[in-house]
Image: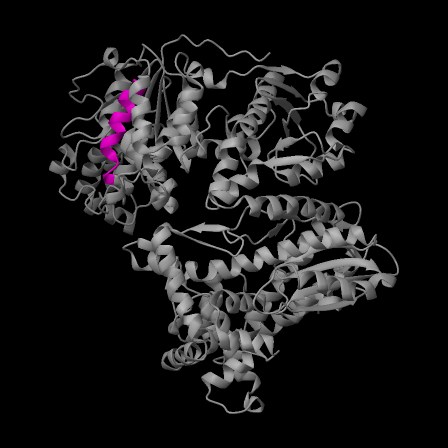
Amino acid sequence: MAAVADVKQDKLLLLDGNSLAFRAFFALHNSLDRFTNSEGLHTNALYTFSNMLETILAAEQPTHMLVAFDAGKTTFRTQMFDDYKGNRSKTPSELSEQLPYFGEYLDALGIAHYQLVDYEADDIIGTLAKEAQGQMPVTIITGDRDLTQLTTANTTVKVTVKGVNELETYTPAHVQEKLGITPKQIIDMKGLMGDTSDNYPGVTKVGEKTALKLVKEYGSIETLYQHVAEMKKSKLKENLENDHEQAVLSKKLATINTAAPLTISLADIKRQAENQEKLIAFYEAMDFKSKLAKLQISKSTTSADADAAQKINAQELVAADLPQILKSPQPQAFEIDILGDNYHLEMPIGFAIGAADHWYYSQDLSLLTTPEFKAWLANRDHEKYVFDSKKTEVLLTRLGAPIAGMTFDLLLVSYLLNTFDNSNDLGVLAHLHGYQAVQTDLEVYGKGTKRAVPMDPEVLGHHLACKAQAIYRLKTPLLTQLKDNDQDQLYDEIEAPLALVLAQMELNGITVDSQRLQTMRLDFEKRLNDIQALIYEDAGHEFNINSPKQLGTVLFDELKLPVIKKNKTGYSTSVEVLEQLQGDNPIIDRILTYRQISKLQSTYITGLLKVIHPDHKVHTRYLQTLTQTGRLSSVDPNLQNIPVRLPEGRKIRQAFVPSHPDWEIFSSDYSQVELRVLAHVSGDANMQAAFKNKIDIHANTAMKIFHLADPSEVTPDMRRQAKATNFGIVYGISDYGLARNIGISRTQAANFIAAYFEQYPDVERYVKDIVEVARQQGYVETIMHRRRYLPDIHAKNYNLRSFAERTAMNTPIQGSAADIIKVAMINMQQRLAEENLQAKMLLQVHDELIFEAPATEIPILEKLVPSVMDSAVKLDVPLVVDSAHGPTWYDAKG
């Protein structure tokens, strides 16, 4: 059984209250309107801070603790420099209203908090850290890197890197490794470079790189200025001389006061026991129902020991235990882990299983392939609760022990409840839902090159068991929330079964002809060389085409093309700039073509060759919980983004072939599915009539906006502009945006939009109504009740509010289209099995499904696939499916 260490050594933990409160607020800023109590008080910062604090307490286990806050804007630093922090935006009122309650929460937890007039939280922290020297180790947690100057052999500073739970640990050795200076020299560095956040100047034109170089060379600002006169004449020397007083002042402003006149000492901040009554009252007042429920249910695990939440009855699994464990009829949680993300390549590092208060873990994967375990895994009647059923299915299938009966997937349910927070780290999601008795993978495995399996098998086993327990404990409350949101059908009938369909598609993979890719690579190299020669001829000399600086010199200094935009490093040579210069010189078209082919070469030709598996296939992974609209995303490799608008890009699809001789690739895709969804949800009679009567919707729109009497008058260019208008309306496009997209004046674009709404008046009504729905309820839904929360719909900032309004317009359309093809995929997989066909579904690319099948089954698919896809969801207009087939994906799609 995993043991929990009994830590008795005194330890001081100091938290930068203001910094962490701001971090907490912005961590859930996107769901601001979802976190309010019955009184209308915003609670997102309090909620996130409480989650963060629970994680910190479990990890640090301090005996002494204080949360320091700023007392106000006026301090001894503002007396030294009037503009100190003068550029900071006003604290959002939604955060300001929460700040008084931080103290109430900390009091309930028995944690001291303090502020001191004329001083900052940094000074309180610095003074207490100094007092603790020689008495107890100190840990400081902050979002402000200024506090890293306090790092000593006795004091560790942990800085939030991303969100609120990912921390970078600063020790003197880490400061030396990262910056090449001592912690105390950070003050000199800040004095020279200044600080835009705190708004003090430093020395003109001295950034971090130059400041570090000077500090390493001279040691301090004082020593530097003793030698400035000896420096060679330069702009740097001139700036140093001119800004001497600014540098000295900036160093003073950057220096944390470690002798602030505090009225408290270490004896006053010893951690006290929680006040359960106050904590319950606080959670009730804030409407933190999940925290209240957890507190009421598990008082015995939260009252005495700070680490009690991490205690779990977990033991290592041995073969002799299997009959007893697996015979239980009750549902069990099952968790299997890998270190990285790609479960098609990595082997599991261990697994855990259990229910209620009994948990077992093992790193011995051979246990999973014993007859007892394989039978339990394959038995649908034995319910399993998991995290990421798709990953679990793929890993166990690779091990030869396929699984069935997964009735709860924590990852999918959490995603449906919170599309804005879609981490694949079980610990992170558990914390989001108020469950703290599990660490994050980041905390246990580390990150980047340091990510590794813990050396101690008990540490790994304990973590796996805690993860399984989290799945088990969160199942009931999260499914209740799902049902309350009317999203249980979305989970049961779409997302959960789709995960298994995707697992099978990923395992199938798609065959890639690597020889054809090699030939393409040679062709692309020759094409690039030819274009490069023409570019050199246009320029009059050779240069590095991939260097923005050299390219800018050629285009704007030598060829005298009009300067469109400049940036910090010189002329901008972005695609947007180059497209505006097309027609001014043939070199522009050649550079754009060079870039396009170069990207195809590196990203898709070379990139694909690197990820072909030994079975001559690529096995992409579909991210089911990434987007807020419900669309799937493809990674490792991304097969959805092959740039098919370019002829060269389309040719890459020639390398995707069937896995057997005499088989073909078969493709079916929805025609204008998003516009059909728009016709359905808006109820617009004119748009619905066009689709029902099989009228070309783009030509129909073109007739109206160009005031034409007959379809024969519609030119291809008119249809192109009408098409852009049709799809632009779905995404809330402005007259400015439409004008840029189709190359017309803004006035013309406004007239197009007005004519569009005259033709389709109920679409205009829908656009207005759905934005109002978003304002009233804070979210919009797809036809399958997939939700997207829009906290910025009430934002004072015009850009934020406008984006939220456009999102309100397009999410029900785009999201419903995603729902439709998901239903089609589930039904299609079922029909292939029912018809006993050899055909396999391989890929989903937006509105398209790709299969491989024996040539003899192609006539069957030509009838079967469209009939399944066009009946996936019943709309007020027909769904139309186009199909094609051939020896490669290119031939099936083109």
Residue 676 in the image: x percent, y percent? 56, 68
Please identify the quarter of the rendering in which residue 825 is found: bottom right
> What colour scheme does the image use?
one colour
Q: Nearer the viewer, residue 732 or 122?
A: 732
Residue at 42% x, 30% y is: 290
- In the rendered structure, the answer to whether residue 503 lies left or right of residue 477 reads right
- In the rendered structure, the answer to whether residue 143 lies left or right of residue 840 reads left
Considering the whole magenta stretch, tell me its main secondary structure: helix
Q: Quadrant of the C terminus?
A: bottom right
Q: Nearer the viewer, residue 451 or 32?
A: 32
Against 390, residue 434 (above or below) is above
Residue at 49% x, 73% y is: 726
Please identify the quarter of the rendering in which residue 719 is found: bottom right
Q: Nearer the viewer, residue 393 or 835?
A: 835
Residue at 69% x, 55% y is: 843
Q: Nearer the viewer, residue 634 or 190?
A: 634
Q: Is residue 108 magenta?
A: yes
What residue span does the magenta drawing correspond to?
96-110
Q: Is residue 158 visible?
A: no
Please identify the quarter of the rendering in which residue 379 is found: top right
